[in-house]
């Protein structure tokens, strides 16, 4: 089950590590050979990751490849905490990420899981953030989990209308930054999953979310969410 939940949350971790502007993941500060990114979570959704990037190649701003290695940790309300090792080859094409991994014979094979890097709204603004009151449209995304980990229906995520608040100074891993708070509602539809023949429901979740987009870094450095009074924070704590 640990592998299953990690597969689902890998999408969240990559999304939080990346820029919402037009440059996207391929132009993120850590997307180079020897690049590193660290994310730390607290509260009800304690997601975290230590990631290292190698074998990086770029064709243009939205077309790149990299090997991603490291560890991911998670501790969600109602689920036991866990830790997983990550080793994937990632290809990004027009905002979509696909993955390969090494099989038992030592050969690379496609991982069936696929997700849209814009999922949490972090790649979905479509234009620069320039002023308070600016809005971005509602969107719908879908996550298909790796079928080797779990048999499940796709996970469907809806993000509501996003509204930019007044620019504020916050503390980040890169020091004080003047950042835009972008607020919206995120809704994950209920589904079900099968673990070795045992079918379990996965409940729907609705959260109020604030992305803190820092234009000088071209990244969302912090995401705050609240689900029924349970607060969570996931933030970039290291990048190079």
Image (cartoon, rainbow, N blue to C red):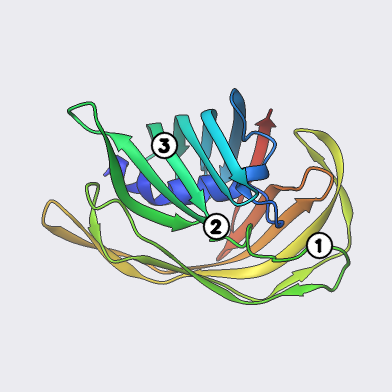
Tell me the quadrant of the picture where the C terminus can be found.
top right
Q: Are marks 2 and 1 in contact (CB under 8 Å)?
A: no
Identity of the residue drawn at 39% across and 31% down = 87
Total of numbered circles in the picture? 3
- Seen in the picture, residue 128 relative to 24 is either above or below; the reply is below
| Sequence order check, earlier mark of 1 and 3 | 3
Q: Is residue 240 visible?
A: yes
Query: How far apart in space, not on screen, are marks 1 and 3 (Cα)?
Result: 31 Å
Secondary structure, mark 2, is loop
In the depicted view, which residue is nearer to us: 4 or 93? Answer: 93
Front one among 91 and 202: 91
> Which is closer to the viewer, label 1 or label 3?
3
Question: Residue pushed farthest top?
Answer: 34
Residue 156 against residue 213 in the figure, above or below: below
Mark-to-mark CA distance, 3 and 2:
16 Å
Q: Which residue is mark 1?
A: 129
On screen, residue 23 above or below 2: below
Residue 185 image point, x, y percent? 61, 71
* Residue 45 can be seen in this image: no
Other residues around mark 2 within 10 Å, as few (<14) / some (14–19) / many (≥20):
some
> x and y percent of residue 127 in the render?
75, 65
Query: Which mark's residue is nearer the viewer, 2 or 1?
Result: 2
Which mark is first along the chain, 2 or 3? 3
What numbered label is drawn on residue 142? none
- Residue 34 in the image: state x and y as whole percent: 59, 22
Q: CA distance from mark 2 to mark 1?
A: 19 Å
Q: Say which element carries label 1.
A: loop
Residue 89: assigned label: 3
Judging by the rendered image, the residue that carries numbered circle 2 is: 95
Residue 7 horizontal side relative to residue 165, left or right: left
Where the N terminus falls, by quadrant? top left
């Amino acid at each position: 089950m640990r592998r299953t939940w990690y597969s689902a949350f890998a999408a969240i971790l990559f999304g939080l590590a990346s820029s919402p502007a037009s440059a996207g993941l391929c132009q993120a500060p850590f997307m180079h050979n020897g690049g590193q990114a660290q994310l730390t979570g607290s509260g009800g959704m304690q997601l975290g990751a230590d990631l290292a990037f190698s074998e990086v190649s770029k064709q243009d701003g939205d077309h790149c490849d990299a090997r991603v290695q490291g560890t991911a940790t998670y501790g969600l309300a109602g689920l036991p905490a866990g830790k997983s090792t990550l080793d994937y080859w990632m290809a990004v094409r027009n905002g979509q990420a696909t993955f390969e991994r090494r099989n038992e014979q030592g050969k690379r094979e496609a991982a069936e899981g696929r997700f849209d890097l814009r999922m949490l709204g972090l790649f979905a603004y479509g234009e620069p953030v320039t002023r308070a009151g600016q809005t971005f449209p509602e969107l719908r995304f879908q996550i298909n989990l790796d079928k080797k980990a779990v048999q499940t229906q796709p996970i469907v995520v809806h993000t509501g209308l996003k509204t930019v608040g007044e620019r504020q100074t916050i503390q980040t891993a890169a020091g004080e930054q003047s950042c835009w708070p972008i607020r919206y509602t995120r809704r994950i539809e209920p589904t079900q999953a099968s673990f070795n023949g045992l079918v379990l429901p996965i409940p729907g979740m609705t959260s109020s979310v604030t992305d803190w987009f820092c234009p000088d870094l071209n990244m969302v450095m912090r995401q705050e969410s609240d689900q029924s009074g349970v607060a969570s924070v996931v933030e970039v704590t290291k990048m190079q």
